């Protein structure tokens, strides 16, 4: 804490400056002055927190100095040291805001106590001022986030009317002048199949970019931009109550269409929007739901479009599914007819999109087709997640397929994955069977080794086993057995086995016949090889 002392008597000035242990109490004497004029000059440079001054001084007395200082630096604490026991002086000092009025000759302890008390006041005031400033700074820094949290809760109908009014006032949203509202919900369209700059994992980043572009584009408009719990960008348009709803609707259509154009220019990707109807503050939630519902109609109308909500009541009717579709799809999967499967999916969804007048029947068709896939997969005892791999995520949330292109392509991919998995399982099963055959051949070289023997042990048809072995290994089973027997016999003869023992070890009881077969295979007799 900084202290300045003003006293015209040099002896008293030096005594006050050097005889009182200021440093011990964290007080630093930053300036000394012998009169008021000099004191003002020093104060401009030193800016002390505390001022200890005499009243009787030449050129400018203490009270005039105190009045000047408090007018320029009102936070300064002043302790007056006066030789006049005069009520008028003391009263004037109090009126000016002087902290303490001491009479000479005051002792060092009394002066020190008065200065320390004033220093404590300064510290307390600085702390309070700092805390208030910090709270205000934090409040202003957090205000945009708090406003977005409130707006998000408002469209989700989390507040009663009185809470809405209270929070809107607290958060300085300035909603009082507006009486009509409308909500638009914007989302990036699904990435096209040929997209290379971005991956599916970049979707949150792209949606955040859309929100940033919207905030910049709509700056200065009566519109609040924030994101909802789904991560979609919400535009809350506002208008005065005396403006016709048609004017607000027109403004929204123009601004949202232009915004989608700006997004395409900036990101080289498209976005779409759903537009709710104009309403009062109490029905903002309804307008938000309408906007979300309108955005789903991308499944019918496609991408890069602002879709207004239309309250069309579709007739209650069940969807007439093709009774042969599931049977034909199952048969195509069974016979590995990939082209036929793709054609069936195209025909099915082509008809579905042709007759659908909204997204609701489209999603019903999607649910039906997904159930067909589930039955095909589970009837074979497979795992749905393993079969569909990355497309399994859409099974858990079919409404994340937002366009007809996405729905169509997902169905075709899912069907193709089923066929691919079936082929992999077939190969895996074949590989296991062939592996078992090869292991049995190695163990049974000394026995009666025939295709029928292995077929019985493996519980499969001999003809199927013969064809499978030829397909997977590229050679006939009998040729493979002969090769392995001759190679084994050669190894035994190289290890100094007798010809009789080598023949017996590879399943030949007649040594002469073994010798004939060996000569025919290797070109030399067993005895010559040995």
Image: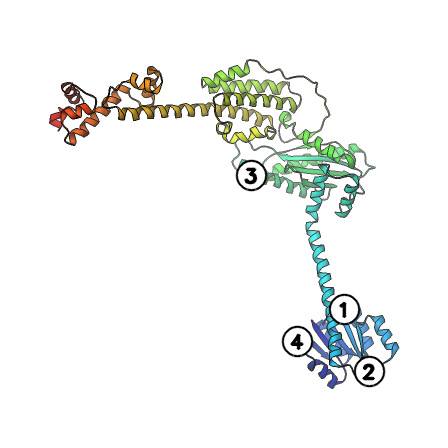
Q: Secondary structure at mark 2?
A: loop
- Residue on which the image places disc 4: 24
State the CA–CA distance, disc 2 to disc 1.
26 Å
- Residue on which the image places disc 2: 83
Judge whether 320 appears above or below 106 on screen: above
State the CA–CA distance, disc 4 to disc 3.
63 Å
Residue 102 appears in which quarter of the rendering? bottom right
- Residue on which the image places disc 1: 73
Picture coordinates of residue 359 (x, y %)? 65, 24
- Mark in the foreground, 4 or 3: 4
Q: Could you say which disc has been placed on residue 176 in the image?
A: none
Picture coordinates of residue 527 (x, y %)? 11, 26
Q: Dividing the image into 4 quarters, which one contains the C terminus?
A: top left
Question: Pointer 3 and pointer 2: residues touching (CB < 8 Å)?
Answer: no
- Mark in the foreground, 3 or 2: 2
Q: Dividing the image into 4 quarters, which one contains the N terminus?
A: bottom right
């Amino acid at each position: 804490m900084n202290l300045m002392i003003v006293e015209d008597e040099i002896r008293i000035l030096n005594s006050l400056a050097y005889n009182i242990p200021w440093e011990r109490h964290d007080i630093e004497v930053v300036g000394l002055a012998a009169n008021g004029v000099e004191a003002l000059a020093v104060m401009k440079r030193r800016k002390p927190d505390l001022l200890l001054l005499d009243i009787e001084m030449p050129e400018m007395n203490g009270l005039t100095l105190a009045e000047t200082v408090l007018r320029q630096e009102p936070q300064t604490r002043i302790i007056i040291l006066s030789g006049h026991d005069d009520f008028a002086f003391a009263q004037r000092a109090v009126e000016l805001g002087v902290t303490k009025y001491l009479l000479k000759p005051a002792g060092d302890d009394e002066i020190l106590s008065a200065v320390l008390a004033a220093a404590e006041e300064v510290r307390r005031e600085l702390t309070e001022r700092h805390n208030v400033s910090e709270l205000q700074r934090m409040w202003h820094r957090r205000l945009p986030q708090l406003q977005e949290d409130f707006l998000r809760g408002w469209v989700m109908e989390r507040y009663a009317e009185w809470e809405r009014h209270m929070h809107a006032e607290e958060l300085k949203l300035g909603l009082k002048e507006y009486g009509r509202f409308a909500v638009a919900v914007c989302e990036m369209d699904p990435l096209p199949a040929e997209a290379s700059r971005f991956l599916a994992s970049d979707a949150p980043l792209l949606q955040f970019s859309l929100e940033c572009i919207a905030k910049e584009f709509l700056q200065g408009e009566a519109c609040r931009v924030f994101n909802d719990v789904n991560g979609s960008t919400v535009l809350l348009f506002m208008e005065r109550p005396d403006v016709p709803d048609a004017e607000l609707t027109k403004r929204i259509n123009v601004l949202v269409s232009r915004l989608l154009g700006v997004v395409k220019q900036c990101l080289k990707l498209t976005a779409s929007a759903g537009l709710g109807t104009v309403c009062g503050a109490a029905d903002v939630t309804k307008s938000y739901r309408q906007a979300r519902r309108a955005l789903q109609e991308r499944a019918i109308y496609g991408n890069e479009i602002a879709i207004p909500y239309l309250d069309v009541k579709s007739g209650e009717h069940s969807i007439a599914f093709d009774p042969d579709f599931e049977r034909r799809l199952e048969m195509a999967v069974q016979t590995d007819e990939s082209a036929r499967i793709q054609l069936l999916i195209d025909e099915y969804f082509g008809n579905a999109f042709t007759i659908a007048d909204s997204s609701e029947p489209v999603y019903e068709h999607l649910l039906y087709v997904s159930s067909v896939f589930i039955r095909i997969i589970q009837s074979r005892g497979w795992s749905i997640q393993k079969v569909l791999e990355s497309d399994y995520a859409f099974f858990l949330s079919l409404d994340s397929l937002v366009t007809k292109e996405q729905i169509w392509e997902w169905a075709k991919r899912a069907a193709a994955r089923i066929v691919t998995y079936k082929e992999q399982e077939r190969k895996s099963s074949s590989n296991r069977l062939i592996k078992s055959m090869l292991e049995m051949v190695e163990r049974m070289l000394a026995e009666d080794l025939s295709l029928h023997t292995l077929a019985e042990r493996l519980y499969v048809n001999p003809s199927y086993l013969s064809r499978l072995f030829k397909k997977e290994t590229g050679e006939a089973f009998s040729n493979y057995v002969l090769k392995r027997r001759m190679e084994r016999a050669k190894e035994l003869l190289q290890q100094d086995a007798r010809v009789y023992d080598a023949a017996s070890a590879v399943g030949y009881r007649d040594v002469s016949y073994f010798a004939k077969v060996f000569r025919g295979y290797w070109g030399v007799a067993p005895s010559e090889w040995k």
